[in-house]
């Protein structure tokens, strides 16, 4: 990896974006080093020279996704926001900011959720567990859950929202154009407002 990090930042990002694109489009098994090299405009041997193997490159990208999203979360975090749904919105905004930095991240992260190849299955499972832990910690660490009705479990709501987002992501033919994503985000935020209206106690609704 040291040889890769010695490259100019622009070339690193070009190679990374190519790898995100190919893995996101084809999944781990069908993605090839040759396709990644062609997408990046470099020789196949150079990809192996920089990363050693396809698996090393794939796992590096997974870790990079977490790093990029965490950096955006830290930049976009506002500890004064304690409302559950507002924190979900804030987290969504940070993910979109990460996608704009690396447009192909969107398809890559989506593909991870459906990856079953034996060579990376355990690593993907660990990635998923870490992502869930980070997300729940970020959403609930500063959240005032007392606003919810007594028979509503906010953790179930959070899981439902994640499933809804993943379901949408899997059906979106993302091509780097943020228009569809922005349209979905607007509708998603409208849904959050509706959920807030019906899942909060009466006194909280009156404050909306």
Image: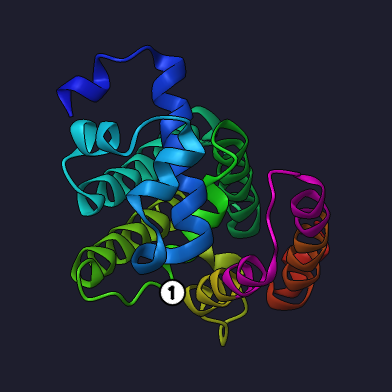
Residue 75: image location, x then y, percent = 50, 27
**Residue found 62% across the figure and 75% down from its top:** 167
- Residue nearer the viewer, 200 or 52: 52
Count how many numbered circles sit on residues in the image: 1
Using the image, determine if residue 158 lies above or below residue 144: below
Where's the N terminus, which quadrant? top left
Q: Residues within 10 Å of mark 1 (few under 14, many from 20)?
A: few
Which SS does the magenta portion mostly show? Answer: helix
Where's the C terminus, which quadrant? bottom right
**Residue found 82% across the figure and 62% down from its top:** 187
Residue 147: image location, x then y, percent = 61, 66
Residue 190: image location, x then y, percent = 82, 62
Q: Can you see residue 175?
A: yes
- Residue nearer the viewer, 10 or 93: 10
Q: Which residues are magenta?
A: 164-185
- Residue labelled with disc 1: 114
Q: Can you see residue 69?
A: no
Residue 112: image location, x then y, percent = 41, 64
């Amino acid at each position: 990896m040291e040889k890769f990090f010695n490259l100019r930042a622009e070339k690193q990002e070009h190679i990374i974006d190519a790898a995100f694109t190919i893995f996101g489009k084809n999944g781990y098994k069908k993605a090839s080093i040759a396709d990644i090299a062609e997408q990046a405009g470099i020789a196949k041997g150079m990809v192996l020279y920089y990363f050693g193997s396809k698996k090393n490159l794939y796992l590096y990208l997974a870790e990079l996704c977490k790093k990029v999203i965490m950096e955006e979360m830290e930049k976009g975090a506002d500890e004064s926001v304690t409302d559950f749904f507002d924190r979900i919105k804030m987290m969504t905004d940070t993910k979109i900011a990460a996608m704009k930095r690396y447009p192909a991240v969107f398809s890559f992260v989506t593909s991870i959720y459906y990856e079953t190849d034996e060579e990376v299955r355990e690593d993907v499972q660990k990635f998923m567990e870490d992502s869930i832990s980070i997300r729940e910690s970020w959403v609930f660490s500063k959240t005032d859950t007392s606003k919810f009705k007594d028979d509503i479990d906010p953790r179930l709501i959070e899981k439902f929202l994640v499933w809804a987002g993943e379901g949408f992501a899997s059906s979106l033919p993302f091509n780097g154009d943020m228009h569809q994503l922005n349209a979905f985000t607007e509708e998603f935020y409208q849904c959050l407002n509706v959920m807030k209206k019906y899942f909060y106690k009466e006194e909280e609704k009156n404050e909306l």
